[in-house]
Amino acid sequence: MTSRALASIALGAAVILGATGCNMISPQATTIPYSAAEGINIDDASGPVLVRNLFIVADEKGKNGNLIGYFINNTDEDHTVSIQVGEGSDAISVEVDVDANSTVAVGGSGDNGDDPILLEGLNADLGATVVSNITSGGETVTTHLTVLEGKLSYLKDLAPSE
């Protein structure tokens, strides 16, 4: 083989590697799990109860808010989910009882929709997140719940009433 052919092969390999090499070291975005809705999801690795689309809808000033979300218990035992919203002396603590093999839709719609849980004295900025601890089966997950404004057309029925 001549040096000209070897140079052509080396140049071709360099062009191919240069054009596609980024894909070898970049993470593939479609393999990264995320919550595609307003709220957060917590899987079963953090306790027996699954949490789906959990978020807060607040009044105009962020003074009070409604906790919205779904709690799914796929076990044969009843469980209580403890939720602490905020930190320190201003933290608000609530509990949700989830029967065995059932779903509780807090603030949800349809036949299984319970009333939202009012978080009085939330005092959060609209559009911000609030540090929250969610405990299920003795396992606690610290996360950030989104605080959405109740004036948005699709959330106005979920906002706390005056």
Image (cartoon, rainbow, N blue to C red):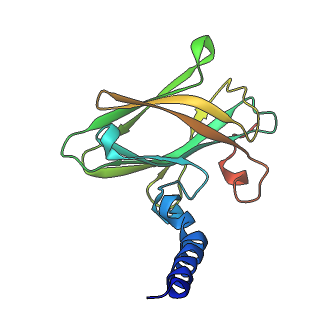
Q: Position of residue 26 (x, y in %)?
A: 53, 59
User: Camera-side residue: 60 or 20?
Assistant: 20
Image quarter of the C terminus: top right
Against 12, residue 117 (above or below) is: above
Left or right position of 5 against 50? right
Residue found at x 58% / y 78%: 11
Against 56, residue 74 (above or below) is: below
User: Camera-side residue: 26 or 67?
Assistant: 26
In the displayed image of the protein, which residue is found farthest to the top?
Answer: 89
Q: Position of residue 19 (x, y in %)?
A: 60, 73
- The quarter holding residue 129 reads top right
Against 82, residue 152 (above or below) is: below
Residue found at x 63% / y 31%: 130
Left or right position of 80 against 6? left
Image quarter of the N terminus: bottom left
Q: Position of residue 45 (x, y in %)?
A: 31, 42
User: Camera-side residue: 145 or 149?
Assistant: 145
Left or right position of 161 against 80? right
Q: Is residue 115 visible?
A: no
Against 139, residue 69 (above or below) is: below
Residue found at x 68% / y 23%: 121
Q: Position of residue 111 (x, y in %)?
A: 45, 60
Q: Is residue 18 visible?
A: yes
